[in-house]
Image (tube, rainbow, N blue to C red):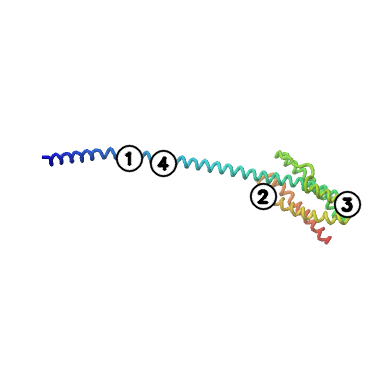
Amino acid sequence: MYKLLGLITLTGLAVFSMTGCPGNAGNGNANTNRVMNSNMNSNMTNANAMNANMSNANAANSTNMNNAVSSTSDQFMTEAAQGGMMEIALGKLAATKSQNPEIKAFGQRMVADHGKAGEELKAIAAKKKITLPTEMAGGAKETADRLSKLSGAEFDKEYVKLMVDDHNEDLEAFEDQQDSTDADLKAFADKYTPIIKSHYDTIKAISDKMK
C-alpha cells in the first residue's frame, strides 16, 4: 500500500511539474524577447549616434576645407598686392636709374601693367570685404630701399636678377591660382598669368644678354 501511495505521489509530482513547464517556457520566451528588444534598441541608438558623429565630422571637414581655401585666397591676394607695389616702385627706379634702354622700357611696363592689375585686385578685395595692404612692408620694402641706393650698372645687375627671380615666383603663384574655386580670383589669374609669363620672358632675355 505504501508503495502504491509513493507511486501516486511521484506521478502527481511529475504531472505537476509537466503542467508547470509551459508557464516557465512562456516566462523564458518573454525574458528572451525583452533582452532582444533591449539589444535592438541599444544597437539602433548606437547606430544613430554613429550617424550623428559622421555628420558632425563631415560638417567639420567641410568647414575646415572652406577655411583653408579662404585662407589661401587671402594670402595670394595679400602677397600679390605687396608684390605689385614693389614691382611699381622698382619699375619707377629702373626708368630713371638704369643705363640700359631695354631695362628702362621694362621698368615703365612694370609700372603700367602692375598698376592696372593692382586696381583690379583692389576691386576683387572690396567685393569680398578683404583689406589689402596699401604700403610696402617687410621684404618688399627692404628690397626697394636697397635698390634705391644703387645706380648705373650696379643697379641694372641687381634689378634684372631680382626681376627674373621675382617673376618666376609670381608665375608659379598665378598658375596655381588658375585652379582656384573662387571664380573672381580664377578669372584674375587667367587674365594675368600670360602677362606675368611675358614679363618673365622679356627680363630673362635681357638677363641673358648681360652675361
| Pointer 1 or 2: first along the chain | 1
Task: Specify the label residue 29 is tagged with.
Answer: 1
Q: CA distance from mark 1 to mark 3?
A: 100 Å
Residue farthest to the front, as pictured: 2
Q: Which of 117/46 is in front? A: 46
Tell which tag, 2 or 4, sits nearer the viewer. 4
Q: CA distance from mark 1 to mark 2?
A: 65 Å
Tell me the residue that label 3 is attached to: 97
Query: Are the residues at dot 3 and dot 2 in contact (C-beta closer than 8 Å)?
Result: no
Task: Specify the label residue 179 is tagged with.
Answer: 2
Percent of width and height locating residue 145: 83, 48
Q: CA distance from mark 2 to mark 4?
A: 51 Å
| Pointer 1 or 3: first along the chain | 1
Tell me the residue that label 4 is attached to: 39
Label 3 Cα crowd, 10 Å radius (few <14 / some 14-19 / many 20+): many
Label 4 Cα crowd, 10 Å radius (few <14 / some 14-19 / many 20+): few
